[in-house]
Image (cartoon, rainbow, N blue to C red):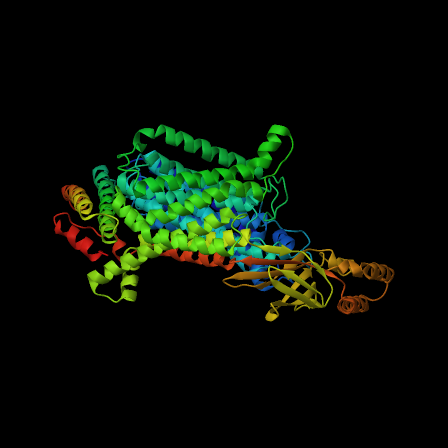
Amino acid sequence: MGGVLVVLAIAVVLAAVVWVVSGPLRHRHSDDPERERRAVRRAELDAAREAKYREIRDTELDWRTGKLSDADHAALDRVLRAEAVAILNELDELGDE
Amino acid sequence: MAVLGRACLILAFALTLYGVGAAIYGAHPGRRAWADSARRAVYALAALLTVAFVIVEIAFITSDFSFALVAGHSSTTTPLLYRAAAAWSSQQGSLLLWAWLLSLWSSLVLYLTRNRLREITPWATAVLMGFGAFFVGLVVFKESPFATLAQAPAEGVGLNPLLRYPSMMVHPPMLYSGYTLCAVPMAFGVGALLARRVDAEWVAATRKFALAAWLFLGIGIVLGARWSYVELGWGGYWGWDPVENASLMPWLISTAFIHSIMIQEKRGMLRMWNASLCLAMGTLAIVGTFLVRSGIIDSIHAFVEQGNEIAWAFTALIAVCASGSIWLIYSRRDILRSEHRLDSLLSREALFLFNNLLLVALCFVVFWGTFFPLISEALTGNKSTLGPPWFARYTVPLAIVLAVVAGLGPVISWRRATWANFKHNLIWPLSFTAVVLVLVIAFADATSNWLAIAMFGAGAFVIACVGQEFWRGTRARKIMSGERLPRAFVSLVARNRRRYGGYLVHLGIAVLFIGIAASSAFQHSITPTLRPGQTARVGGYDVRYLRPTASISVNGSGHVEHINFGSDVRVSKNGKFVSNMHTERDYFPTQGAGGTLSDYFAGNQTSEVGLKAGLRRDIWIDVNDTNIGSLMPIIRRGDKVFGDAKSIPAAMYNQLLGQALLGLVKRYKATAPPVQFRMLISPMATWIWLGAIIVFIGGLTALWPSPRGMARRARATYKARIAQDLGRARA
């Protein structure tokens, strides 16, 4: 009896694994390579934008804590904001998903 | 249950092979469903290994000795909590734990990135499943935790007494979490290189994974050091043991990586260096596991027999990881070129680069010293080992310079600092350092311990630099927001978690380094032999041996768990009472003890250290030799008597044996033979543990996601959002 239960349990586990793993293959959606490419690029730009924002904030904090002079901060901030705008422009061009 | 567990492992192994194949197939465009299926295979792997691990745990908790693993590493006398942790004291349980943690962390990471890094995750999945296949393959084909015995014994061997310590329940899972998490940046590094996408998205994700690995590995290392300090009876916390070094190497490389990846994030520089570091992290994690589990190099931490069969498998895996990493870096060198160059040597980038070189040099020293026995054996035929003095000769100067760099980093800006600002920022830290150095030199023996003095100076410098940064940041926040100082401090850290979490880590490392320098350079140590009433003097403290103690510890089922012989001592200074302390040595019986009196003294021994910890110094006392040899003539006579009395009924025999043991215990207390102690006065040893706690708080702070870090889709048409977004996060 115990042996039968173990075999049954193994069968249930096997069926569950096959069902879970094959899910995406059973409900396959057609891939749109162009849409995929755009999504990848957008994700990359999102990350770049966040990194740029962080860099601008870090620069400002460096300035406020006395590590950058006013002139250096102003020049650096201008460059970084221009880079951020360039990233946002590219995001604009990609449009919404 | 064992059959179900074995079936789960076989299924898991098949699943890992499917996962590798499906992920590689799904990595190509237009086959996303296969990549998703491979990701789900990782989830299913985690579920299967959870079932397998739970079965092993149930077997340990219920003392099911039909499992060979349980019979060999647990017993009914082992306390419940230690029975639950006994699984990973064995080779089989450890390998299963590795595979299980790998599957859990991989599932979490792949779930978090399910809609991101689309070109990288399939390759990363394949690598993680490849590691999974290796470890699950080991437990399926070589080291099965589900091997059963035809005849289950009535009692098990029991858990090694040295492992019966609370932190040892957490230490291995933490360390293995660190090791398995080290595989994650490596997997995503391989994925990024294969997909040719070492971009900002990869950087952001990989940095977090590396930070998590660094945190867990660090916690595991510190717990191991603490266990060594209070349990191993030698008074040290770090012995440059191969297994300790094994965990330190990936930790050093991950420390380098989480610094240098910031340069890539901000400047697009050091791409090849970062890719190399993240691949090295994963490879060194496997090297670490290899050292712990193969027993190839002698270690007090490796609880496996030497020369076991899995060493060759690990060697092959390490060779694949190392050669594959080199090939990948070489073949992708075109995408790993830096976008920029250093603007100035007076910048945070330059300091980070220097800190990376120091960390890698430290790692190389540790690697060379660890593998020297194998290298020397291969070259000369003789196995030579390099001891702590050799390691100290190279690591201490490197660590001092590293500490100075850790202080300079926070006070220098990115890109280009000016000398005027730099000098202005150093006035207060250098003044504080000078005061500390004068005080230390005035009160310590500066001539013989100049390296320790230098470390004090470097530590003080870091503390001052970090303190200044916190103060200036808080003041700036207060001026901007009008908040009170405490509130401004909290806001500052909450809004800049990465930066100030990192500063906290630097602060903790400085405190930890000071603790190491003070406790190792200014430690007082003696090993006196005393009779009750006699006193020894160590580091200005008088330690009086008051009386011997002895008792038999019996478990719930009436079996002798261990017999302990100890000592009560009183510590005083200049005639003033400081503390009463107790130390003892526990003697564990051999398996199936009961035949003779000797059986009760022939098993493992552990120390229970007497420890009075404080911020200024630790008083550490261990009974080195209890002198139970004085009882041996009686024990031998008893063995003979009991050997001749086998014919009497078992119940009476056991009763008489128990009375004889009680008699031995009483006699030890009555005769009070001279006892050898080991006594240490370790200045500021507690700073090591406090520093470690600060480091982990800082690491958690840096790792914790900020509320605004949640991905928002900012529409670029609202360019004013730059100002809006940044304004929200201003100091």
- Whether residue B469 is visible to the viewer of this picture, yes or no, is yes
**Residue at image location 65% in from the left, 56% down from the top:** B526
Name the spot of residue A43 as percent of width and height, x first: 24, 44
Q: Please give the name of the residue rendered at 64% of the width and 55% of the height, measured from the top-left corner.
A: B71
Q: How many marks?
A: 0
Q: In what quadrant of the picture does the C terminus of chain B appear?
A: bottom left
- Foreground residue among B328 and B546: B546
Q: Is residue B75 visible?
A: no
**Image side of residue B506 versus residue B441, left or right:** left
* Residue at left offset 76%, top offset 69%: B662
Q: Quadrant of residue B626?
A: bottom right
Quarter of the image for the N terminus of chain B: give it. bottom right
Please provide percent x and percent y for residue B523: 57, 54
Residue furthest to the right in view is B644
Point out residue B636 in the picture as x, y percentages from the top left corner.
83, 58
Q: Is residue B458 left or right of residue B5?
A: left
Q: Nearer the viewer, residue A94 or B397?
A: B397
Asked if residue B687 is positioned above or below residue B303 in the image, the reply reads: below
Above or below, B157 against B558 in this view is above
- How far from the left and from the top, in percent, is residue B182? 43, 45
Asked whether B526 or B498 is in front, the reply is B526
